[in-house]
Amino acid sequence: MTGGLLGGIEAGGTKFVAVVGTGPDDIRHRLRVDTTTPDQTLDAVVEFFLRNRVASIGIASFGPVELRADHPAYGHITTTPKPGWQDADLIGPISDALDVPVAIETDVTGAALGEWRWGAGRGLDNFIYVTVGTGIGGGALIRGRPVPGLVHSEMGHVSVERQAGDSFPGGCPFHGDCLEGMASGPAIEARWGRPAHGLGADTAHGVDLEARYLAAGFRNLVYVLAPQRIVLGGGVAKMPGLVAAVGEYLVDAMQGYAVLDAHRRGFVVRPGLGDDAGSAGALALAELAGGKSPEWRDHQS
């Protein structure tokens, strides 16, 4: 008997975390496995859920991942540089072995769902979750649902104005000085010669420059999607004072344009669920996979 329990899989390039429960405050069982080969990793996850049966499963996955339900590669990792994982099928082995509904989304959209369901996005119709770490990714919820499209959104690749005096060429292999190229963790390390957590005497300057670039990128997101809030997570977001500084610079970047709520201070916030947003989001996806929301029928297998 499942007792209405949900299964969540936070599928990362370094590790997979599988959980069983009803929400982030009610986790009954947890599994952490290193991301090795697709067969080894998924076999361990399937075995975990065979021992701990659930009514439905949500997968919040690293990408790129195919999310179009009518596409032959639906639920597959696509052009990832992760060795052995290109074209790997995530949904098929899990759905076939466990015979339960399965939903899949990107890891950052999963985190957005977790924050919407239980964290800093509760009670909101429209908001964005942005994570800044090895890369920059964003997930937008409109009326509490991810925005569907040709592919999942790539908010980290929006164009940003170069800050005065910054000669760093940018680290994005596709666009050079896009938001991710200027403000991701690797960009910080390439610019300063040290990772974000080790800036030392340069921390204040590093935080200031990072905040200015993120605010410039967030201005684009605000104008396009009109969110009620932006939740800023990821390892880089833990730099002391960064979240508050981004909020302040975003106010300046809006230049008094007050049609949208971004002119209010407190618009950019930390994740309410901390590092658990991803696994919580996978459980939220499992809720939706179980048929609690008819709008999500196209995300079920």
Image (tube, rainbow, N blue to C red):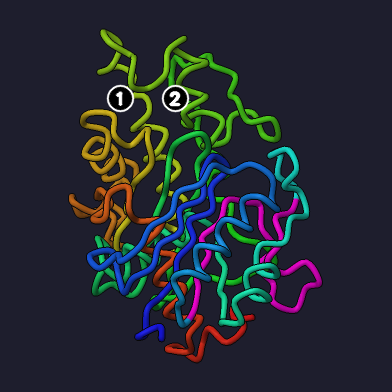
Classify residue 211 by image quadrant: top left
Residue 207 in sight here: yes
Classify residue 217 by image quadrant: top left
Please provide percent x and percent y for residue 58. 50, 70
Please provide percent x and percent y for residue 75. 68, 66
**Above or below, 153 relative to 142:** above
What residue is pinned by disc 2? Answer: 163
Q: From which residue to which does the magenta span run? A: 56-78
Mark 2 → mark 1, Cα distance in angstroms: 11 Å
**Above or below, 27 relative to 80:** below
Magenta stretch holds residue 76: yes
Query: Which one is nearer the viewer's eye here, 97 or 255?
Result: 97
View extreme (left): residue: 265
Q: Closer to the camera: disc 2 or disc 1?
A: 1
Query: Which one is nearer the viewer's eye here, 132 or 88?
Result: 88
Residue 224 in sight here: no
Task: Identify the disc placed on residue 208.
Answer: 1
Rendered residue at 47%/50% (across/down): 220
Circle 2: residue type: Gln
Left of 266 or right of it: where is 53? right
Q: Earlier in the sequence, mark 2 or mark 1?
A: 2
Q: Which secondary structure is most common in the magenta stretch?
A: loop
The answer to whether marks 2 and 1 mark residues whose Cβ atoms lie closer than 8 Å is: no
